[in-house]
C-alpha cells in the first residue's frame, strides 16, 4: 500500500461545489478528483523539477 498523508483543507464554498460536480461527472470521489487534478497540474512523480 502506498504511503499517504492526511490533511485538513479549507475551500471556498463555490470551489468545493465545482470540485464536487466535476468529481460526480468523472465518476470519482471528491478526494480522488482533487488528487487527479493536482497530479495533472504538477506532472508525473519524479519529473525533472523544472517548471514548464
Image: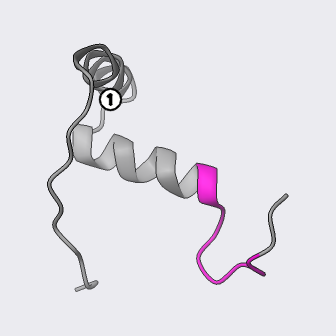
Q: Residue at x 25, y 32 (%)?
A: 11
Q: Which residue is mark 1?
A: 23
Left or right, residue 24 beside residue 35: left
Left or right, residue 13 beside residue 44: left
Residue nearest the viewer, comparing 5 with 26: 5
Q: Say which quadrant the C terminus sits in.
A: bottom right
Q: Which residues are magenta?
A: 41-49
Left or right, residue 38 beside residue 25: right
Q: Say which quadrant the N terminus sits in.
A: bottom left
Asked if residue 21 shows in the view, the reply is: yes
User: x, y percentage for residue 3?
Assistant: 26, 85
| Outermost residue toward the right in this view | 52
Q: Residue at x 38, y 53 (%)?
A: 35
Q: Residue at x 22, y 17 (%)?
A: 13
User: x, y percentage for residue 28?
Assistant: 29, 38
- The part of the image, by quadrant, that contains residue 43 is bottom right
Asked if residue 29 shows in the view, the reply is: no
Left or right, residue 44 beside residue 48: left
Q: In the rendered view, tell whether residue 48 sits above or below residue 43.
A: below
User: x, y percentage for residue 6?
Assistant: 16, 67
Residue nearest the viewer, comparing 12 with 43: 12
Q: In the rendered view, tell whether residue 37 sits above or below residue 17.
A: below
- Dot 1: element: helix
44 in magenta = yes
Q: Residue at x 53, y 57 (%)?
A: 39
Q: In the rendered view, tell whether residue 22 sits above or below residue 8.
A: above
- Marker count (numbered): 1
- The part of the image, by quadrant, that contains residue 20 is top left
User: x, y percentage for residue 16?
Assistant: 26, 24
42 in magenta = yes
Q: Residues within 10 Å of mark 1 (few under 14, many from 20)?
A: some
Amino acid at each position: 500500500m502506498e504511503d499517504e498523508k492526511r490533511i485538513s483543507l479549507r475551500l471556498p464554498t463555490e470551489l468545493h461545489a465545482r470540485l464536487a460536480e466535476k468529481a460526480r461527472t468523472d465518476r470519482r470521489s471528491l478526494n480522488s478528483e482533487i488528487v487527479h487534478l493536482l497530479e495533472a497540474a504538477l506532472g508525473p512523480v519524479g519529473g525533472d523539477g523544472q517548471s514548464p
